[in-house]
Image: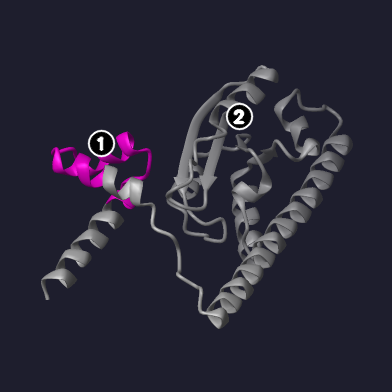
Amino acid sequence: MFVRSYLRASTDEQDASRAAQQLVEFADGYGQRVAATYTENASGTRTDRPELIRLLNDAQKGDILLVEGVDRLSRMDAEGWSQLRNVISEKGMRVVALDLPTSHTAMGARSDDEFTQRMLDAINGMMLDMLAAIARKDYDDRRRRQAQGIAQAKERGVYRGRPIDQELRTKVDELRAKGFSVRRTAELAGCSPSTVQRIQKERTADVSVARR
């Protein structure tokens, strides 16, 4: 059995690896070792997350998919979650989430009692489905409140869109001007390579407009 931890954050500006040590310590508490860690910045609503797909491709029967919370694994709609659950099941993996105590039994010794084990798997599956549904509802609720807030701000004429992290943009500009690569700039600035590329693209667009 290999324990494969999955870490996800929704945006490039968030630290997806934040909970890495917490997952390592959790596994240690059960005498297990995290054999591989898969980290990415992507929406939990997406089914095409590269690192999650890589994890599933690497996984073998009996492996553990370890996450901080079920919402880190999925904020998908019912169809998307059903597809992911089927893939995990077909791979013979078990999901263990820190926020789902019923799943923690998979980290310890397996029961020799087939009936007991099937009952535990059924309970865990039901709880996983419930938390996945709650995670999706939370996502939908926040999106709805955000849309309402933007609409109200537009009515008042005070909506300015997403604020620009000027400090980060300046830091990226300085590092790139010194000749650092995109990846090294991202490491030094504390953001993702895609954020560096986006800032550069925006800066190029700004310069282009200014020259007109």
Residue 67 image offset from top left, x and y in percent: 62, 39
Q: Nearer the viewer, residue 116 or 15?
A: 15
In the rendered view, tell whether residue 146 sits above or below residue 132.
below
User: If the image is split into quadrants, where does the N terminus sit?
Assistant: top right
Q: Dot 1: within a 10 Å radius of its alpha carbon, few (fewer than 14), some, or many (20 or more) residues?
A: some
Inspect the image, locate mark 2, and give the three-letter code of the amino acid beneath it.
Answer: Leu
Judging by the rendered image, the residue that carries numbered circle 2 is: 23
Q: Does the magenta segment cover residue 84? A: no
Q: Is residue 119 left or right of residue 11?
A: right
Q: Nearer the viewer, mark 2 or mark 1?
A: 1
User: If the image is split into quadrants, where does the C terminus sit?
Assistant: bottom left
Inspect the image, locate mark 1, and give the three-letter code of the amino acid beneath it.
Answer: Arg
Q: Residue at x 60, y 68 (%)?
A: 146
Q: Residue at x 34, y 51 (%)?
A: 166
Q: Is residue 23 left or right of residue 128?
A: left
The reply to whether residue 47 is in sight is yes
Q: Secondary structure at mark 1?
A: helix
Residue 90 image offset from top left, x and y in percent: 62, 50
Numbered disc total: 2
Q: Secondary structure at mark 2?
A: helix
Residue 189 image offset from top left, x and y in percent: 33, 38
Judging by the rendered image, the residue that carries numbered circle 1 is: 184
Image quarter of residue 152:
bottom right
Q: Does the magenta segment cover residue 187? A: yes
In the rendered view, tell whether residue 176 sits above or below residue 110.
below
Upstream in sequence: badge 2 or badge 1: 2
Label of residue 165 in the image: none
The reply to whether residue 1 is in sight is no
Magenta region: which residues?
172-196
Q: Nearer the viewer, residue 35 or 72?
A: 72
